[in-house]
Amino acid sequence: CAEPDIPTNGQIDVTSGRIYGSEVKYSCDEGYYLNGSSSRKCAINEEWNRRQPSCQEIHCEMLRIPDQAVITSTINHRFESVLTFSCNPGYHLTGGSQRICSGKGSLGEW
């Protein structure tokens, strides 16, 4: 089989070279998730089975912002981005003042 491509923002681990039955395993850098199969095998026709996976950036969904809440930081919804909350005058914050986008799936969590 041909040399397998390394996905952008990812890595590969090839076992037993590129001969029939060899396997290539795919993983992604922190902040990215694997879109597709995590492994492929070299088939008898000298082609890798399955489609080449890709590494996609983890994003968090927009939070519902309560009335009278103020976000004092930039919102970009990317992995490890931080939202900082405060309240309008006359209101007080209950709970933490920051949320960080984190997670290992395709959709991160705040």
Image (cartoon, helix red, strand yellow):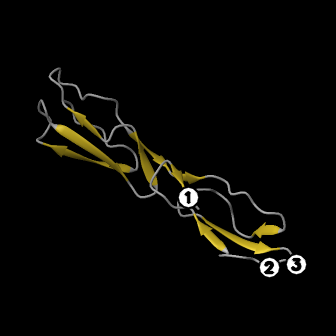
Pointer 3 local density, CA inside 10 Å: few below 14, some 14–19, many at least 20: few
Question: In whole angstroms, how far apart are the C-alphas of marks 1 and 2?
Answer: 24 Å
Q: Residues within 10 Å of mark 1 (few under 14, many from 20)?
A: many
x, y (%) of residue 110? 59, 62
**Residue 91, placed above or below residue 18:** below
Q: Quick one: SS at disc 2?
A: loop
- In the rendered image, residue 84, in percent from the top left (x then y), is placed at 68, 71
Could you tell me residue 54's position as x and y percent? 40, 40
Which residue lies under the disc numbered 2?
A: 92
Which of the pair 110/22 is nearer the observer?
110
The residue sitting at 34% across, 30% down in the picture is: 51
Q: Earlier in the sequence, mark 1 or mark 2?
A: 2
Q: Dot 2, how many residues are within 10 Å of its Cα: few (below 14), some (14-19), or many (20+)?
A: few
Q: Secondary structure at mark 1?
A: loop
Q: Which residue is mark 3?
A: 89
Distance from the alpha carbon under mark 3 to that under mark 1: 29 Å
Question: Measured along the vertical axis of the image, is residue 84 above or below residue 5?
Answer: below
Q: Secondary structure at mark 3?
A: loop
Q: Is residue 44 above or below residue 23?
A: above
Q: Residue at x 72, y 76 (%)?
A: 94
Q: Name which of mark 3 and mark 1 comes first in the sequence.
A: 3
Q: Which residue is mark 1?
A: 109
Q: Amino acid at mark 2?
A: His
Question: In the drawing, what numbered circle is on residue 34?
Answer: none
Q: Quadrant of residue 36?
A: top left
| Mark 1 residue type | Glu
Alpha-carbon distance for marks 2 and 3?
8 Å
